[in-house]
Image (cartoon, helix red, strand yellow):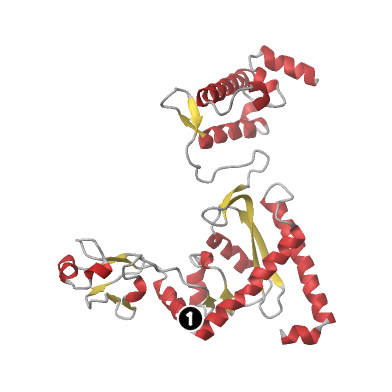
Amino acid sequence: MSSTGKSYCRRSLGIPLLAEPSIKKALDIDWSNPAAKSAALNRLLGQIETLEQWVETNLSSESSKPPLQDQLALLEQLRGQDLEPDPDRGGQRIKRGVAKDRRVSVEDPDMRHGRKTKTKSFNGYKRHVVVSLHTKLILAVTVAPANQPEKDSLPTLVDRVEHLGLELASLHFDRGYIESSDVPELVASGVEVICKPWRQSNGDKFAKTDFSLDFASQTVTCPGGQTQPMLLGESARFEADVCNACELKPKCTTSDRGRGLRIAANEPLQAKLRVLQRAPRGRARLRQRVVVEHTLAHVGQRQGNRARYLGIRKNEYDSTRAAVLVNLQVIQHELECPKLANAA
């Protein structure tokens, strides 16, 4: 069917907006006017519902299998994540806030919202690499949606390193990976974790670092000398009567129910990392991870910071290609300047 014929069919069905190359242009409203924007949105939704009803009536068998099934499911997903009932004007409105795991691209189902900082966001994917600090060669690469926590990518990276027949002696990574389910198993198997501990702050009140944690006896003692049992992954609560009578209370808590202290599930590891961070030699070891940061920058220079393809699989392939080029550059540098490379 010609484009003219398709446009005629859409208009005859009462869905002229869907026949236009630019729906926003066809609506032709003042987008700064909330009432006009609401009316335009519900006009568009009405025409989409008309089309869905026609498909259900005339293409019921085709709508239950790809590719039409996928397109209808996409419409439902977009409505569910982006719209909500409008209590003021009726109908629907753009949802306040961002839905969890929100799909941000019609063409790319894997792309997601992500954040570099609290104020800087981006759409797309995250690159993860494993680098040998000794050779500076990239050993493994993976790509994940931008909203996926770093900890979820660690198992994949570890599996790919082990697939090469290599054994991990130590892991230097960002604190975002430390909650991975693989970390306790790695530590138990003798792998040393080198990472900055979680930040411990409590305003002008005593922080967790001011308390004495005894993992052998499973107790925690406050700066005032009160001792309570502690369980990993739960909160320890100090007795209110003792806290309220303590002369250090103004420096500890404003609560009349006693001071509470959250004990992380990986608190023993966090304690070791805090000791590591306090020592000059430990801070020097933490700085070794700069090799990883430089390597990620080199991969970014080769690959660019915009996804070239749709979907995780192809973009991971592209990241692997860029990693191979970076490795070849490292090898070339080693061959051309062996003395300089060894000194570094």
Q: Residues within 10 Å of mark 1 (few under 14, many from 20)?
A: many
Relative to 30, does residue 191 appear above or below in the rendering? below
Q: Quadrant of the N terminus?
A: top right
Q: How many marks?
A: 1
Residue 202 placement (x, y as % from top left): 35, 65
Given the image, on which type of amino acid does mark 1 rest?
A: Leu
Residue 326 is left or right of residue 196, and the answer is right
Residue 52 placement (x, y as % from top left): 59, 23
Residue 199 placement (x, y as % from top left): 44, 68
Residue under pointer 1: 276
Quarter of the figure with residue 252:
bottom left
Residue 136 is left or right of residue 3, and the answer is left
Quarter of the figure with residue 224:
bottom left
> In terms of secondary structure, where does tag 1 sit?
helix
Residue 230 is left or right of residue 304, and the answer is left
Relative to 106, does residue 281 appear above or below in the rendering? below
**Residue 96 in sight in this render:** yes
Outermost residue, right direction?
A: 336
**What residue sits 30% from the left and 76% below the top?**
218
Along the viewing direction, whichever of 226 and 73 lies nearer the viewer: 226
Relative to 150, does residue 138 appear above or below in the rendering? below
Residue 324 placement (x, y as % from top left): 77, 66
Relative to 194, does residue 65 appear above or below in the rendering? above
**What residue sits 50% from the left and 45% below the top?**
100
Outermost residue, top direction?
A: 12
Residue 52 is left or right of residue 21, and the answer is left
Q: Quadrant of the C terminus?
A: bottom right
**What residue sits 74% from the left and 19% below the top?**
6
